Amino acid sequence: MILGTAGHIDHGKTALVRALTGVDTDRLPEEKRRGITIELGFAPLELEGVGTVGIVDVPGHEGFVRTMLAGAAGIDLALLVVAADEGVMPQTREHVAILGALGIHGGVVALTKSDLVDPELLALAAEDVAALLVGSSLDGAPVIPVSARTGDGLEALRAALAAAATRVPSRDPAGDFRMPIDRAFTVKGTGTVVTGTVWSGHVRRDDMLRAFPGGATLRVRGVETHGRAAEQGRAGERVAIALAGAERDALARGGLLVHADGAWEARTRLRADVALFADAPAALTVRTPVRLHLGTSDVGARIVARGGPVRPGVAAAVRLVLDAPIVARGGDRFVLRAASPVATIGGGVITDPLPPFRRTPPFASSGANDAQRLRWMVEEQAAQGLPLAQLGMRLGGSRSALEALLAALPEGIARVGHLLTLSASLREAEQTLRSAVEDGHRRQPLDRGTPLQPLKAKLGLGDDLADAVVRAAVAAGVVEVRDGVVARAGWTPQYSPDDLAACSAIERFLTAAGREAPTAAEIAAVGGPRTPALLRVMEREGRVVQVGEQRFLTPAAWRGALRALREATREPREYSAGEVREVFGISRKYSIPLIEGCDRVGVSARVGDGRRFHWDRLPSAIAAFLDSTDGEP
């Protein structure tokens, strides 16, 4: 668990941390010289019944709010520090607003420097703080008078912090590892070291991590928590990680470490719900530049909302357009600051870190629950399907919550393998499949059916979903798929009386032609305008054989030609076209198509201008054809 300080400059945050832990978190010479906190400071705090919590001490100066945000983003529990001799000040108000924007609801107020005021002024300061917190995320937080100098109230503060800590939900230890980087430095003999608060999951020695921005893959050399070597760093702990293969200049505050095998992506377009503070100076339009603070990152952003500008005190569903890509997860909270004049103006929550299209519109409304957001995501990706692998990232939440959602999918959503889609889309595609198959049978009653790939393209679905629709139709006994062709179940080509007569005429014509294979156009003179379709069916039924380019023989003529060729070319050598023509006993006009037919079925192979025959290693289908007597007198 992480405890973060908050409060106005010079209200005693660092002195209080030192009194509680014995650690001076101001480590920089400039901090010592100026007597103010400039950078984030860290210390361990032992709380009875809780254990060790990590303290993040943040600056209180208005010029260092960016640094305060980097520290506050990872805290679970707030320690709001207000000096009794000054009471509520500007950064007190700003920090309380920031804590609310980040969704930090657990906290305790330390009324510091209580030894410097009389009881009446102390009571007034406590009332001032309580009034500020009404309606905030820290509403009702205990207010404990303390003095870091005398030690008065420290034990009461410890007890209040311990009680508040027991009410804070623990972070997800089973989630994917993620740690925003707040410091990066080099240690002699160790190399590059980064520190941060582990937001989820855990990290161990020799784990492979990816560093954003850039996506470089790095190996963990060692892990420390609270200055001591550890077996692992877990969610909710302050961790220092030594990295192998890391360039110090490539790692800095604002970066992020995740497990290398995770599905994390950096994006410049995200969906979010945004709410401006009621006292924000102006509405946000698409042209208003703001700074977005998420984790330790700080990027320029523009807000695209439904229905126009985002107005103070109103929540809106928006699309975030960022100046640089960041890695986010559904449910991540962020803070918005105006670029000029610089001020904290609001915050929000990521509702979809991986929208599927560059200009994906904002969601229909803000405040939607997981089930509603899931439906919207499925609706916009129904054709291709929403990958289940993305859901943990896009919806956020725990694995158990996601599993429960998938176990009871909202009505109208169907799970197909690794995808989610709309049940209606599957029904429409199935009807399209049936109609297309029936239409194919009507238009080409002699064909076996419709080719599978063009048919799938008509369904308007991605390959995986289209395959699933076809499989479902086959399982339901609606269609059959054979050799890449889809037909109505039980379908057989339908010959009309005219077709039967044409087929007989074609067979007589080919029988008379012998080995002089006529062209399809020549056959059409006797078979009529449906000859091409009839030839396809007759070839499939084994009544004709295509040799060469659009030339046909009867099976008996083709078998006889091959047998004669086998007897004449048993010697393993190259045979010229003239020699083969003599074997066939026909002119060159007709022998060339037969030779090309031999090449096509694997009987021969071209070598220069001649052929070499492979009678000892024929394809099984040709060997069986040669041995057959089908169609012979």
Image (cartoon, rainbow, N blue to C red):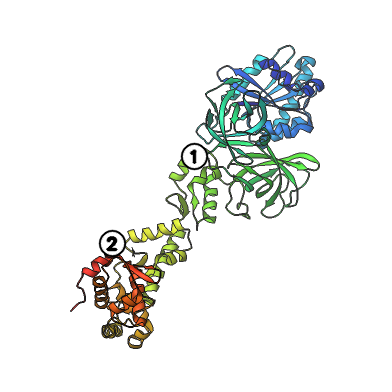
Element at label 2: helix
Element at label 1: helix
Q: Is residue 188 visible?
A: yes
Residue that numbered label 1 is attached to: 401
**Image location of residue 549, percent across then percent down:** 39, 76
**Outermost residue toward the left?**
633
Camera-side mark, 1 or 2: 2
Q: Is residue 241 above or below residue 584?
A: above
Name which residue lies at 24% across and 74% down.
Answer: 564
In the rendered structure, the answer to whether residue 331 lies left or right of residue 253 reads left
Q: Quadrant of the C terminus?
A: bottom left
Name which quarter of the figure residue 86 lies in. Answer: top right
Q: Amino acid at mark 1?
A: Ala
Name which quarter of the figure residue 551 lies in. Answer: bottom left
Towards the viewer: 220 or 29: 220
Q: Amino acid at mark 2?
A: Arg
Q: Do the CB atoms of the residues marked 1 and 2 lie less than 8 Å apart?
A: no
Residue that numbered label 2 is attached to: 617
**Image location of residue 106, percent across then percent down:** 62, 29
Q: Is residue 447 visible?
A: no
Towards the viewer: 335 or 259: 259
Q: Is residue 209 above or below residue 41?
A: below
Q: Is residue 6 above or below residue 391?
A: above
Name which residue lies at 48% across and 58% down.
Answer: 462
